[in-house]
Amino acid sequence: MNALIEHQDLSAFNTLAIQAEARFYWAIESQADLSAALTWYRQENPQMPLLVLGGGSNIILSDHFPGLVLHMQNKGIALLEEKSDDETVSIDVAAGENWHELVCYCCEQGWHGLENLALIPGAAGAAPIQNIGAYGVELCDVMDSLECLEVDSGKRYRLSAEQCQFAYRDSLFKKAGEPRRIISSIRLRLRREACLNTQYPGLQQSLHSLGVTPEQASPGDILQAVCNLRRAKLPDPAALPNVGSFFKNPIVSEGHYQQLKSEYADLVAYPHGEDYKLAAGWLIDQAGWKGHREARVAVHEQQALVLVNHKRGSAKDVLALAQKIRDDIWQRYQVSLEIEPRHIQVDGALAPS
Ligand code: EPU
């Protein structure tokens, strides 16, 4: 069983490589670890900030975290025979499983639906928080339910996908006023028969480069095409620290979209219900920010939506650059960009989004 560690360096545990230190830290590999950590926490000071860390790939840490970090490293993928049938397979995945390894494992087993979500960094337990999505598929398309533990009441229960209130890069877990919850495992419902989503234009091109048409593509081809696409466009956090898309694609009214479209004929946008979702990467790129470098942080050279930490910048450096971009985008297009990763402030609280 793991024990409490004081003054733990978190730089290797966040993909933006911010040199943050946690006052208290507990690696969670089992149910026993979680119970012990929470018992300690409640006795020590249940008001102290608590941070649940998965792969650390969607988080902006401040230099010092003044509370307890629970680092989810519990493992296990279990096939639920009684909940599977000829068409579908249900699996329970422990929160600490690496997401991309899960995607590859399921594809090898012939359990389909996750291929488009290959190479997304992070842990399985973090996936529901922002409802991860890529190339036309979102987690909510394959999610059945999840198991969680309420920190304050100690209650353990299951929430259905519907109860999780999934939306674009959003869920119940991001809403203010909700009880503090720790996701311990997620349950996915996958398909035995390949059911491929190849609508995304970039994915079709990537399949063609592999020598297959979208109609002929196997699940393995999709997985490979997605990996190739992401490797070409998105920096590997191990080589160039980043948290993927730094901003959400903003949603604007049809009137606003029409007005922008009349001014910028090649604006990239997708219908989103009655509104339109704009490609923030396009807006930032057009505004001339792609490849922009500051002393410690920069805008990635291939994808304007990604900020990179090339010289050990802090949360302040990253957020200062993000603010300059937000101000400029507002000036040019009257579009408000929202930051996508979660920012943990110096007092340990989550910054409002
Ligand atoms: N574009 C530019 N310049 C850029 C970047 C993009 O002109 O610098 C244009 C592209 O040409 C394209 C459009 O913007 O026409 C959209 O770009 P892309 O296909 O790269 O996707 P995205 O909207 O930038 C979203 C997700 C990604 C996900 C991809 C693929 C968000 C915030 N981001 O990016 O998710 O991988 O679609 O589905 O929704 C993440 O969340 O960390 C992430 C990487």
Image (cartoon, rainbow, N blue to C red):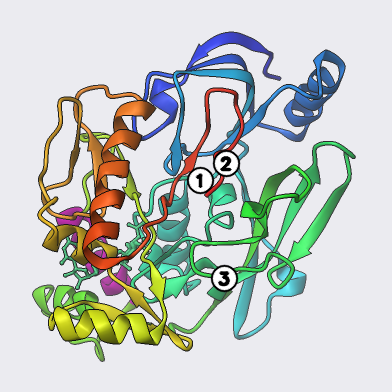
Q: Is residue 316 magenta?
A: no
Q: Is residue 349 above or below residue 160?
A: above
Label 1–label 2 contact, CB within 8 A: yes
Q: Earlier in the sequence, mark 1 or mark 2?
A: 2
Q: In 3D space, how far apart are the residues under numbered discs 2 and 3 (Cα atoms)?
A: 19 Å
Q: Is residue 164 above or below residue 205?
A: above
Circle 3 residue: 140
The label nearer to you, 2 versus 3, is 3
Q: Is residue 231 magenta?
A: yes
Element class at badge 1? loop
User: Front-most of 150 and 316?
Assistant: 316
Q: Earlier in the sequence, mark 2 or mark 3?
A: 2
User: Front-most of 308 and 156?
Assistant: 308
Circle 2 residue: 96
Q: Position of residue 58 (x, y in %)?
A: 44, 44
Q: Position of residue 147 (x, y in %)?
A: 75, 54
> What's under tag 1, amino acid-wise?
Ala
> What's under tag 2, amino acid-wise?
Gly
Q: In 3D space, how far apart are the residues under numbered discs 1 and 2 (Cα atoms)?
A: 6 Å
> What's under tag 3, amino acid-wise?
Cys
Tell me if mark 1 has few (under 14), some (14-19) or many (20+) residues whose alpha carbon lies within 10 angstroms of its own: many
Residue beneath the point at 54% across and 45% down: 97
Mark 3 lies within 8 Å of ligand 1 (Cβ measured): no
Residue beneath the point at 28% across and 87% down: 258
Circle 1 residue: 123
Quarter containing the N terminus = top right
Residue beneath the point at 36% across and 35% down: 15
Q: Which residues are magenta?
A: 219-233
